[in-house]
Image: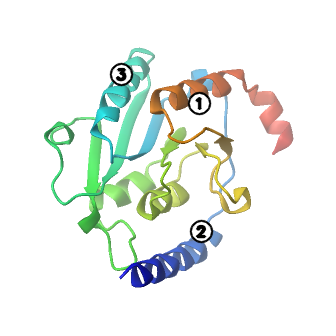
Amino acid sequence: MEFFRNLRIKAGRSMLAKRYSKILHKPSYKGFGSIKGIGIVWDATNPEELAVLAKFHQKMSEAGKQVRVIGLFPGKVLPDQYVGNRFMVCLKNNETDFFYRPDTIEAEAFMKEKFDLLIDINPRDHFPLFYISSLSKASLKVGLAGNDPGTSPFDLMISMRNPVNVDKYLEQVLLYLEMINPETVKKAV
């Protein structure tokens, strides 16, 4: 059974690579102060992490930034705390197609939204979340450093030890974004 699952994911990755190759993504960053919209792609396996995201959402709202979260929960029934959340939508495993690509209106809308910043919190490298992050129209994409940085869709990668502490990871993302000088980024691109 695992063999067929891996084969389907491999086919999904191939389809993603074909679609991704047609996208011209040029990172754009004008400084942390200019960020208005933040999208977060989240592995929602651990419901305790929702409190960290809610705290981050509150902090960013107070700073005048809008945060939207799309998560992937591995079960068929969402935990109660995931339902009715105004800043988050959560996909279930059965909301993917045969090749594990997200197959919902919410996922499609999230990928089309032009966020100023996308933060990927996907330490287990779930393909549906990687798919969303790859095809997101966000101006700047931040994610965890993986095994193959050459195939990463991220403009900024942060290395963290497993298990990834979401609170510390978000702290590091903010720290590095505040340190980056937009003028230096323009010269590098």
Callout 2 touching callout 3 (CB < 8 Å): no
- Residue that extends furthest to the right in the rendered view of this protein: 187
Marks 2 and 3, the one that precedes in the sequence: 2
Q: Residue at x 51, y 29 (%)?
A: 170
Residue underneath mark 3? 55
**Foreground of the two, 126 or 185:** 126
In this image, 32 relative to 136: left or right?
right
Secondary structure category for the residue under label 2: helix
Q: Residue at x 32, y 42 (%)?
A: 46
| Closer mark to the observer between disc 2 and disc 3 | 3
Secondary structure category for the residue under label 3: helix
Residue 59's place in the image compared with 114, above or below, is above
Dot 2 alpha-carbon crowd within 10 angstroms: few under 14, some 14 to 19, many 20 or more:
some
Residue underneath mark 1? 173
Q: Quadrant of residue 103?
A: bottom left
**Foreground of the two, 50 or 106:** 50
Dot 3 alpha-carbon crowd within 10 angstroms: few under 14, some 14 to 19, many 20 or more:
few
Dot 1 alpha-carbon crowd within 10 angstroms: few under 14, some 14 to 19, many 20 or more:
some
